[in-house]
Amino acid sequence: QVQLVESGGDLVQPGGSLILSCVISGNILRPNVMAWYRQAPGKQRELVASRTSGGSTNYRDSAKGRFAISRDNAKNTVYLQMNSLKPEDTAVYYCNGQDTRSEYWGQGTQVTVSS
């Protein structure tokens, strides 16, 4: 059973930075895609960034140039580096994993950008 556990969410001022972590436990198959989604109050969940097991990445337009998704296979961890944070980045951020067998979600971590 694959489990995803996020951490790193916090209250940060506009212009600040955060690193979110997602630890993968269990045996996620290859090929796979790991991704970060977010959901703000009253809004639909949206894709922020994704990374294939082959290393290809994809970002929503508002995240390009500010966010970076990466993976440390030795630590079974996926990261989301977020820079130049804006109030509109405020949301619960979820880690997502997909392999040929299933799709997996973490419990979410709250990111609040406010002065």
Image: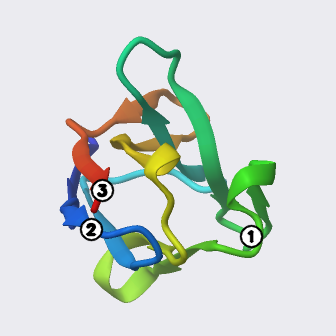
Q: Circle 2 — which element?
A: strand
Q: Circle 1 — which element?
A: loop
Residues marked 3 and 2 touching at CB (< 8 Å)? no
**Residue underneath mark 1:** 54
Q: The residue under label 2 is which amino acid type?
A: Val
Q: The residue under label 3 is which amino acid type?
A: Ser
Q: Is residue 114 left or right of residue 42?
A: left
Image location (x, y in percent) of residue 57 = 76, 65
Residues marked 1 and 3 touching at CB (< 8 Å)? no
Q: Is residue 57 left or right of residue 24?
A: right
The N terminus sits in image quarter: top left
User: Residue at left 41%, top 11%?
Assistant: 42
Q: Is residue 6 left or right of residue 56?
A: left
Marks 3 and 2, Cα distance to the nearest angstrom? Answer: 6 Å
The answer to which of 92 and 15 lies nearer the viewer is 15
**Residue underneath mark 3:** 114
Image location (x, y in percent) of residue 20 = 33, 67
Q: Nearer the viewer, mark 1 or mark 2?
A: 2
**Residue underneath mark 2:** 12
Q: Residues within 10 Å of mark 2 (few under 14, many from 20)?
A: some
Q: Nearer the viewer, mark 1 or mark 3?
A: 3
Q: Is residue 94 above or below residue 35?
A: above
The C terminus sits in image quarter: bottom left
Residue 32 in sight:
no
Q: The residue under label 1 is which amino acid type?
A: Gly
Image location (x, y in percent) of residue 44 = 52, 16
The answer to which of 37 and 57 lies nearer the viewer is 37
Query: Which circle's residue, 3 or 2, is located before the other in the chain?
Result: 2
Query: Which circle's residue, 1 or 2, is located before the other in the chain?
Result: 2
